[in-house]
Amino acid sequence: MPSKVLSDLHRKINDRVNDTADNVMHQTVRKLRIGHRVTYVNCGTCLLDDKFYYYLKTKQARCKGSQAKMYQMRSFRHFLDVFMKD
């Protein structure tokens, strides 16, 4: 296969994986009924309680206003368990 065809195929697969992860994030928010606490900055980033950012692609979190410390998360659900306070 030519390299252009392969690169297009990889791009389509990567887009599908990112869409699936984004859908899981939205489904989790709906399931837990916390839509009033979550703001979607763009398709791969969300802001919880206007304090904590979660980056879907790298699975990292950080506090708003702080670039120094990034927290490695296992999943979006792990992010919610750690940073969401009742």
Image (cartoon, helix red, strand yellow):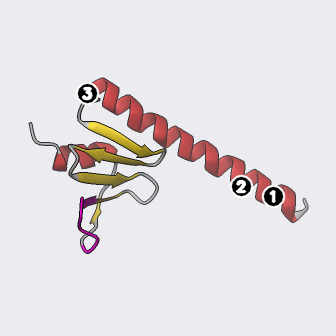
Q: Residue pushed farthest bottom?
A: 68
How many numbered marks have been drawn onto this rendered protein structure? 3
Q: Quadrant of the N terminus?
A: bottom right
Labels 3 and 2 touching (C-beta < 8 A): no
Closer mark to the observer between disc 3 and disc 1: 3
Instruction: Work out whether residue 2 or residue 52 is closer to the camera in this orientation and state it.
Output: 52
Residue tagged 1:
6
Q: Which mark is residue 46?
A: none
Q: Could you tell whether 30 is left or right of 12 in the image? A: left
Q: Secondary structure at mark 1?
A: helix
Q: What residue is drawn where x is 85% and y is 56%?
A: 5
Q: What residue is drawn where x is 39% and y is 38%?
A: 25
C-alpha separation, residue under disc 3 versus residue under disc 2:
33 Å
Residue tagged 3:
32
Residue type, label 2 = His
> Residue 60, position in %: x, y?
34, 60
Closer mark to the observer between disc 3 and disc 2: 3
Residue range highlighted in magenta: 62-68
Q: Could you tell whether 11 is left or right of 64 in the image? A: right
The 10 Å Cα crowd at callout 3, few under 14, some 14 to 19, many 20 or more, is few
Q: Quadrant of the C terminus?
A: top left
Q: Which mark is residue 10?
A: 2
Q: Secondary structure at mark 3?
A: helix
81 in relation to 27, above or below: below
Residue type, label 1 = Leu
Q: Residue pushed farthest left?
A: 86
Labels 2 and 1 touching (C-beta < 8 A): yes
